[in-house]
Image (cartoon, rainbow, N blue to C red):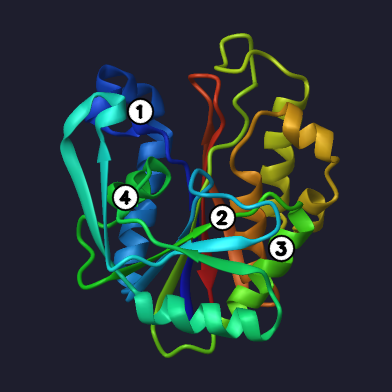
Amino acid sequence: MIVFAAITPHSPLLLSSIGKEHTAQLAKTLASIKEIEEALYIAKPETLVIIAPHGPRYPDSFSANMAGSYTGTLKSFGDFSTTVTAKSDFMLIDRTHRKMREENIPFTLTSSEELDYGYAIPIILLTSHLQNWKLFPISPSMMDGKAHFEFGRQLKRVLHSETRRVAIIASADLSHKLTSESPGGASTEGPKFDEAVQQAISSNNPDALLSLPQDMMENAGQCGYRPITTFLGTLENMNVTPHVLSYEAPFGVGYLTAKYEIA
């Protein structure tokens, strides 16, 4: 059953080993992540389902990484000392895959012990006190938001029928084109996209996101749309109360944190 749900950014700058003195500019985000970490510990999930955008992506299929265990490093960001490990919930991944295929839902399995930073950063920030948990890493496809929302709905149907306690986490950065200082430069669609995401979450109305024009999302230079629409699908028709904990963009990239109360 789904017992916890949250959205977190995955910027390596959130780690002091990489962000160094710049982490002070992310104080609101870090405080919100701490609040999420404490709530996650209280929820005592047995499995973390993390939906992250930078893994293998297929044009017409969603995917999950079913390795026996996972290891992630941050060497590409200059941190050679940090290593994150996780056990795989391969039985749950296998059951989910079988049920999805029975319903003709395109869902592919990959197998790699390497975790990219989209998974590694949330694991580092959220599991320092969590015990005896396993990982279910999901990658979105290249299909549109409505397809991802529908996939999330079907994923919810499988996970909510399980006896295992499951946490759903969307690992998602928002627009990289907010200002002239942004990594992708300035775009008028960047701020509009970030505002639409905040409105959709705070009002618990995914339609506000699902109706966004495709070119707007592309021009916003974001990586969080598909993880977030999948995430919102997993919560459809559940008794949840969303809380946007923080939003800031000190380096020209939108960082949003949110958690959901599940009745």
Front of the two marks 1 and 4: 4
Mark 3: which amino acid? Answer: Phe
Q: Which comes sooner in the sequence, label 4 or label 3? A: 4
Q: Is residue 176 left or right of residue 144?
A: left
Mark 1: which amino acid? Answer: Leu
Q: Which comes sooner in the sequence, label 3 or label 1? A: 1
Q: Quadrant of residue 205?
A: bottom right
Rendered-image quadrant of the C terminus: bottom right
Residue 186, given in percent of the width and then of the height, sits at 68, 14
Task: Describe the element under mark 3 as helix, strand or loop.
Answer: helix
Task: Describe the element under mark 1 as helix, strand or loop.
Answer: helix
As drawn, 56 above or below 67: above
Q: Which comes sooner in the sequence, label 2 or label 1? A: 1
Q: Which residue is mark 2?
A: 243
Mark 2: which amino acid? Answer: His
Q: Is residue 12 visible?
A: yes
Q: Which residue is mark 3?
A: 149
Q: Which residue is mark 1?
A: 13
- Label 4 crowd (10 A; few <14 / some 14-19 / many >=20): some
